[in-house]
Amino acid sequence: MHAALEAIQSSALSLWLTSSGSSVAANSKQVLETLHFIGFALQIGAIMALSLRLVGLGRGVSIDALARPVFSIAWLAFAVVAATGALQFVPIATEVFYRPSFRAKLAVLLVALATLVWLQASARRGAVAWDAAASVPRTVKLVAALSLLLWPTVIVVARLMYAFVQMAGR
């Protein structure tokens, strides 16, 4: 595994991302971080809006009407977050992969993504009925509440991971 990480970190892409030979590469870290933050803000904002509706806030808003654009925005934003996150990982692969903070970030992210997938599948099956009954099943409310906790936790753990990398001299 370490050899694969070293190959990633010494790749032409990594060298380009860390070089100062072009203005794009010289600013790549800031550009990637900015796009990553914007993507995450869009993703979490969309997910939070739906999760808050599912736990009972904004009862005047149709869950079915809200869910459709929310999931589209969330997945598009996640694609941006995943791509920019992967590009940020390339130059520091060997430094962060084995860190507990990186593993914690991935673990929390996977659980948060699982809640997103579950909520999307549940909303596809039941949103119209929930709107008609003016009631959301307890399990859906619990998963939405969990989602409200997990996504901010992803941010906190990611920031801690980044802080540890910075303290280590990167």
Image: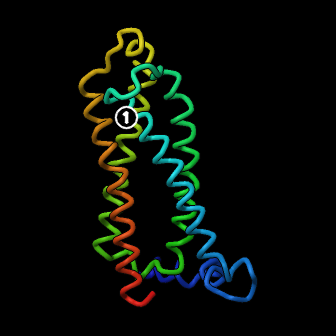
Residue 108 spot, x, y in % from top left: 32, 56
On the image, numbered disc 1 is attached to which residue?
52
Q: Quadrant of residue 129?
A: top left
Q: Is residue 126 left or right of residue 149?
A: right
Question: In this picture, is 148 found above or below 80?
Answer: above
Q: Nearer the viewer, residue 25 or 65?
A: 65
Question: In this picture, is 59 found above or below 156?
Answer: above
Question: In this picture, is 44 found above or below 166?
Answer: above
Rendered-image quadrant of the C terminus: bottom left
User: Across the whole image, how many numbered discs are drawn on residues?
Assistant: 1
Q: Is residue 95 left or right of residue 23?
A: left
Q: Residue furthest top?
A: 132
Q: State the SS at label 1.
A: helix
Residue count near mark 1 (Cα–Cα under 10 Å), binned few <14, some 14–19, many ≥20: some
Q: Quadrant of residue 39?
A: bottom right
Q: Residue furthest right?
A: 22
Colour setting: rainbow
Residue 27 spot, x, y in % from top left: 66, 78
Q: The disc labelled 1 sits on which kind of residue?
A: Leu
- x 35%, y 40%: residue: 115
Q: Quadrant of residue 73?
A: top right
- x 53%, y 22%: residue: 65
Residue 6 spot, x, y in % from top left: 48, 83
Question: In this picture, is 132 found above or below 7?
Answer: above
Residue 61 spot, x, y in % from top left: 47, 22
- x 73%, y 88%: residue: 21
